[in-house]
Image (cartoon, coloured by chain):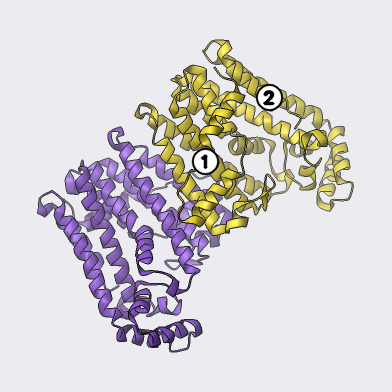
Chain colours: A purple, B yellow
Amino acid sequence: MQSFQDLIAQFSQHFEKQHFPEQPGKLYGAASHILEIGGKRIRPVLCLMGNELFDTLRPDAFEVGTAVELFHNFTLLHDDIMDKAPLRRGKATVHTVYGESAAILAGDVMLINVYEHLNKVDPHYKQKIIAVFNKAAIEVCEGQQLDMDFEGMDPEQVQYDDYVYMIGLKTSVLLAASLQLGAIIGGAGDGNQQHIYSFGKNIGIAFQIQDDYLDAFGDPEKFGKQQGGDILANKKTFLLLKALELCSPAQREELKLLLETSPADKVERVLELFRSCKVDEWAEKEKERFQQLAFQSLDNIAVLSNRKAPLMELANYLLNRQQ
Amino acid sequence: MQSFQDLIAQFSQHFEKQHFPEQPGKLYGAASHILEIGGKRIRPVLCLMGNELFDTLRPDAFEVGTAVELFHNFTLLHDDIMDKAPLRRGKATVHTVYGESAAILAGDVMLINVYEHLNKVDPHYKQKIIAVFNKAAIEVCEGQQLDMDFEGMDPEQVQYDDYVYMIGLKTSVLLAASLQLGAIIGGAGDGNQQHIYSFGKNIGIAFQIQDDYLDAFGDPEKFGKQQGGDILANKKTFLLLKALELCSPAQREELKLLLETSPADKVERVLELFRSCKVDEWAEKEKERFQQLAFQSLDNIAVLSNRKAPLMELANYLLNRQQ
């Protein structure tokens, strides 16, 4: 049993290699660019942890982890084109450097590469590995489409439950599937696979609520981002959608007016409204609720509880961050 | 043993179903749109024929055929975005109707769906099926990148051999792989797989030479396209690249001037130049050469020659068309 920090170090070393051939240079330059932008490699580590929860770490977990990390980067690459984003982690996005066509194609070739890695695993569970991966991959695409659909709508038109569903697809199913894929490699049965999936899904949603909360109420110095960035961008968040539900008709009108007109003191005034309808307290409770659902699922997994310690630590690390 | 016409009818019936769920409507509407534009379904039929050359037709050939046809349509969808093409087969392209973002995402979800079908085949040869498919899929992407690279270059900068290599990747490897995938399902050994692959690859190149030839010298009434469309668009073709190689320095200058200035009688004058440096005769011989290479590979396949009749008929149908 290894800590998540040790596994991150192990995986990062495994992943730091040339993933693509040299030529055609523009195609593989574009594909390599997104990998060089970096990231915490959380998803592949979940895959390793899912494996180690049930059995000794197998090389297949590194193959599937690589597949999951390549897939995640493929989604970032194509999402950045769709969002016309100039920067990611402070670096120029792929389409900005290589043009849109090469960026589309680089994503495509990365997605095919994902299946080169999945095709290497033990035939004993290959069918199940590809099926679980594909389900999550399709859901991630569906989540991205729903997110784009919601973006074109007024906040009031977006139902809170639909938003939770979309966020689940867009940000949580891949975390959940990464754990399940590892569990399959570790020999877990269907029941345990479902529990670990559910753990990952709920941790993902709790994390997103925390992310929205910190953007609004976090200490900008610790959080490392501009306070109220989501509010300034009129982004649909857990807080905004719930506030529209909780507040009085008068407050709702004021909130809508602030979104439409964006006065200089917009962030302050929206935060004041958020506080007065207690959406800050609600968010803390809602995050706690999903966190408890996650821990309940972890409890339900039929292995000795000391094996669960690293997953517990990772969850606490993710859900107690200030930055 | 069935004729290719019968197999086209069989596959088309199998393929004519709803491939995607209803929601999100924009995502799956976009994915369905490209399938509704139609096509001859040549690649999946090659897969069926590859299977039947060696053994009775198996349901797996229909799964892999569906995968190959979905992949082909995915490439058309993404290529149309890259080429900013408004029309395909006279119908509005996906990105024109659904917007670029939904079109990118629809391609992505189709590519994932490809592997849902590949994941259904007999575990006995699944590893090989996915490996052969992935190799071709990656090469198609590489071909598309090289094509875009060449597009930005002067015709004189593009070497003839590099062009043949690019066309092979872009248009022939998927035909070749479709046959090989079918052969794997039919139980063919490695040698026979290589022969049928080589047959498909060379037929594909011969077909492309014919396509370029007909665009320039074909009877526009029979060919159904505007004569000299490639010439008008300054498209790099087998004919243009070879003409630049065969002609005298004076002719080369004239040809380059025609490409740059596009006078009203451009098509006539380029065709005259093509004829005077005998690139028309060369093209007929070059097509014949690749066709003979293909037939030699077909000959080499160790099955009774009457089993090869349908493939021979399909090759003759493809390579003797006037339209």
Q: Are marks 1 and 2 in contact (CB under 8 Å)?
A: no
Q: Is residue A229 above or below residue A189?
A: below
Q: Is residue A145 above or below residue B232?
A: below
Query: Residue B8's quadrant in the figure?
Result: top right
Give the side of residue A223 with respect to residue B315, left or right. Answer: left
Which is more toward the observer, B8 or B242?
B8
Quadrant holding the C terminus of chain A:
bottom left
Q: Position of residue B125 (x, y in %)?
A: 39, 27
Q: Position of residue B13 (x, y in %)?
A: 54, 33
- What residue is shown with label 1? B71
Give the side of residue A270 with respect to residue B57, left or right. Answer: left
Secondary structure category for the residue under label 1: helix
Give the side of residue B311 with respect to residue B232, left or right. Answer: left
Of mark 1 and mark 2, the one earlier in the sequence is 1
- What residue is shown with label 2? B317
Q: Position of residue B90 (x, y in %)?
A: 70, 47
What residue is rendered at 37% in x and 58% in y? A169
